[in-house]
Amino acid sequence: MLENVFLPNYEGKELSDQTFSWSVPSNIALVKYWGKRAVQIPENASVSFTLSNCKTITSLHYNSNKLTDSKFSFDIFVDDVWNKSFRAKIESFFEKAVPFLPFLTDGHFEIRTANTFPHSSGIASSASGMAALALCLMSCEKTCCPDLSEELFFKKASFLARLGSGSACRSIEGPLVAWGKHKDIPGSSDLFGTTLKASVCETFTNYQDTILIVEEGQKQVSSTLGHNLMHGHPFAQKRFEQAEHNVSDLLKVMIQGDMDQFIRIVESEALSLHAMMMTSNPAYVLMQPHTLSIIKAIWDFRKTTEVPLCFTLDAGANVHLLYPYEFKNEVLNFIEAELVVYCQNGRYICDATGVGAQQLKV
Ligand code: DP6
């Protein structure tokens, strides 16, 4: 599918003043996206679980009168407070999205956004935030093209979300989404996320993700900078090949319900991601000593109890504990007994896989 299908076809129609609101969850990658080329095209396919509790709730009010003379007229409020720090990111998103949403230059957009997880938790909100904004904009577009099919609505929302932040394109639907063209995933594309319909083993239904907050606050190196450091990285090509193989293998083992192989692939992906950071030029380390202590404790726990608990990491020090629902009590007891000491202010967040975005009444 080419990006032409996302070009608008509602010439002459104008948007009226309106408000839309969407609630969109974050996602956690099992096979990681790390490395991209212009414009927001991933170097390898990735696969993620869509979460359900860590969400961004965004409402967008469109007013047909622009409030400024600049190309894009908008205001952002985070937790009801006018915000300046996200302006550059939204501006750059609008710039990439405007060929597909020409009404972006027509009026004024008031964006109000809030996360269900604490701002300081170190959990990235760009995936859920960009996906929520993309869906609000799609709701605006839909008023001009009422015949837009549901399928195209969500595909274009994912396409637009990707332009804002790559991983955001995997937050629209759930519980298992792939992004990036891959030989084993029919319909997969570099342009938008594809919900995996293959019947994965029941064990992966309602899979738990408990996020241990090792480090609160902003990470020192943004993902965007990290992706850029993959250009000219000595191991880049091997890493992209590894991820392509891991997508194939992961899908197989999730259909078979092979927990040992699932754990092997997921943990290897997390460690490979951080290995890329540590071997970048300049090199950097986002793991903290407590991250490693948690990993070591998980390995010991798994060996002694045979509970299929594994970890993954995103671009930060926090650790995501992934496990089937039936082991929830056992794992939470283990966290309380052995891991909570490694969490900043004893904080962790319990989440689980979910089905994706929801439109809210305004
Ligand atoms: C480590 O999607 O945040 O979480 O496209 O520059 O916004 P941009 O990057 P982003 O990168 C996510 C990186 C990751 C892995 C993943 O989610 O696949």
Image (spheres, grey):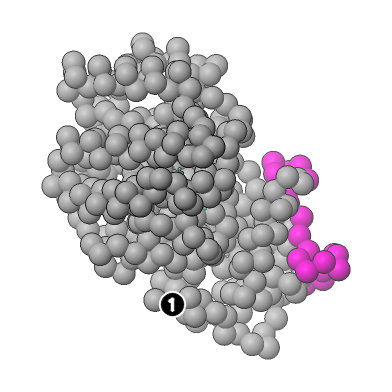
How many C-alpha atoms fall within 10 Å of the one at disc 1: few (<14), some, or many (≥20)?
Answer: few
Task: Please determine whether, in this image, residue 6 is positioned above or below residue 347.
Answer: below
Image quadrant containing the N terminus: bottom left
- Residue 348 visible in the snapshot: no
In the image, is residue 76 part of the stretch drawn in magenta? yes
> Could you tell me residue 344's position as x and y percent?
53, 18
Query: Which residue: 53% across, 64% down?
Result: 39
In the image, is residue 145 part of the stretch drawn in magenta? no
> Could you tell me residue 175's position as x and y percent?
34, 50
> Could you tell me residue 308's position as x and y percent?
22, 29
> Could you tell me residue 102's position as x and y percent?
66, 76
Within the image, what quadrant is residue 331 found in?
Answer: top left
Of residues 261 and 101, the one drawn nearer to the viewer in this rendering = 261
Of residues 213 and 144, the one drawn nearer to the viewer in this rendering = 213
Q: Is mark 1 within 8 Å of ligand 1?
A: no
| Residue type, numbered disc 1 | Leu
Query: Which residue: 20% across, 49% down?
Result: 249
Query: Which residue: 30% across, 52% down?
Result: 241
Of residues 341 and 96, the one drawn nearer to the viewer in this rendering = 96
Within the image, what quadrant is residue 66 found in?
Answer: bottom right
Task: Please determine whether, in this image, residue 219 is positioned above or below residue 103.
Answer: above
Within the image, what quadrant is residue 44 found in?
Answer: bottom left
Question: Is 270 on the left or on the right of 84, as rendered?
Answer: left
Question: Is 191 on the left or on the right of 8, as rendered?
Answer: left
Image quadrant containing the C terminus: bottom right
Residue assigned mark 1: 2
- Residue 245 visible in the snapshot: yes
Magenta-tinted stretch: 63-82
Q: Secondary structure at mark 1?
A: loop
Task: Please determine whether, in this image, residue 211 is positioned above or below residue 242.
Answer: above
Query: Which residue: 64% across, 71% down?
Result: 98
Of residues 69 and 272, the one drawn nearer to the viewer in this rendering = 272
